[in-house]
């Protein structure tokens, strides 16, 4: 091969670099779709429940929820007395009731009214705090 032909031929590196770039771009597109999908899911749940997940974390910290429960995303919430709240909305029941946002709000605010034999105390959360925490648990755990 003469010198001029060698200069015009693309090195194999360019093919590998192009393939790698395509994989990175594909992953970025996929990841951005997941973020948009999760954001849309959270927005829909928040609107349906009427709570604000941003207000839930301070409310859970203030009310000591993490002393008994492990709660993903809540600083210091590593309790082991009660069940982990990871995936709590995927469970069939909340306390003695079929799982629903209304059942969750009742349970986290007045658990002993729902089941007098539960170890969970009545927290007496305000209706808005119960909505906020329910929105958080439905959208983020």
Image (cartoon, rainbow, N blue to C red):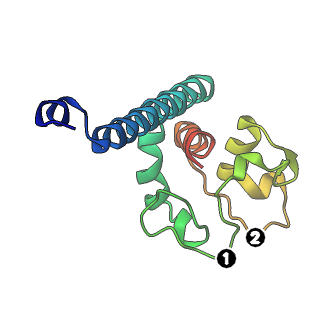
**Callout 1 touching callout 2 (CB < 8 Å):** yes
**Quarter assignment of residue 116:** bottom right
Left or right side of 8 for 114: right
**Quarter assignment of residue 15:** top left
Residue that numbered label 2 is attached to: 119
Nearest the eye: 10 or 131: 10
SS at badge 2: loop
SS at badge 1: loop
Decide: few, some or many residues near mark 1? Use Cα within 10 Å; few <14, some 14-19, many ≥20: few
Q: Residue at x 58, y 74 (%)?
A: 79
State the image coordinates of residue 21 (x, y, percent, origin top left).
35, 37
Q: CA distance from mark 1 to mark 2?
A: 9 Å
Nearest the eye: 7 or 59: 7
Residue that numbered label 1 is attached to: 81
Q: Residue at x 49, y 33 (%)?
A: 30
Left or right side of 98 for 128: left
Which of the image's four quarters has the N terminus?
top left
Q: Residue at x 41, y 35 (%)?
A: 28
State the image coordinates of residue 139 (x, y, percent, origin top left).
58, 39
State the image coordinates of residue 64 (x, y, percent, origin top left).
51, 65
Nearest the eye: 55 or 23: 23
Decide: few, some or many residues near mark 2? Use Cα within 10 Å; few <14, some 14-19, many ≥20: few
- Which of pointers 1 and 2 indicates the residue nearer the eye? 1
On residue 131, the disc is: none
């Amino acid at each position: 091969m003469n010198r001029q032909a060698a200069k015009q031929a693309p090195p194999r590196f360019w093919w590998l670099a192009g393939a790698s770039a395509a994989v990175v771009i594909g992953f970025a597109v996929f990841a951005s779709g997941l973020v948009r999908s999760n954001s849309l899911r959270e927005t829909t749940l928040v609107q349906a429940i009427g709570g604000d997940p941003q207000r839930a974390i301070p409310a859970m910290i203030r009310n000591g929820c993490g002393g008994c429960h492990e709660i993903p995303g809540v600083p210091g919430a590593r309790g082991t007395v009660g069940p982990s709240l990871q995936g709590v909305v995927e469970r069939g029941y909340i306390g003695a009731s079929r799982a629903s946002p209304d059942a969750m709000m009742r349970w986290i605010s007045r658990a002993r009214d729902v089941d007098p034999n539960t170890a969970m105390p009545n927290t007496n959360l305000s209706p808005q705090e119960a909505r906020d925490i329910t929105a958080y648990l439905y959208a983020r755990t």
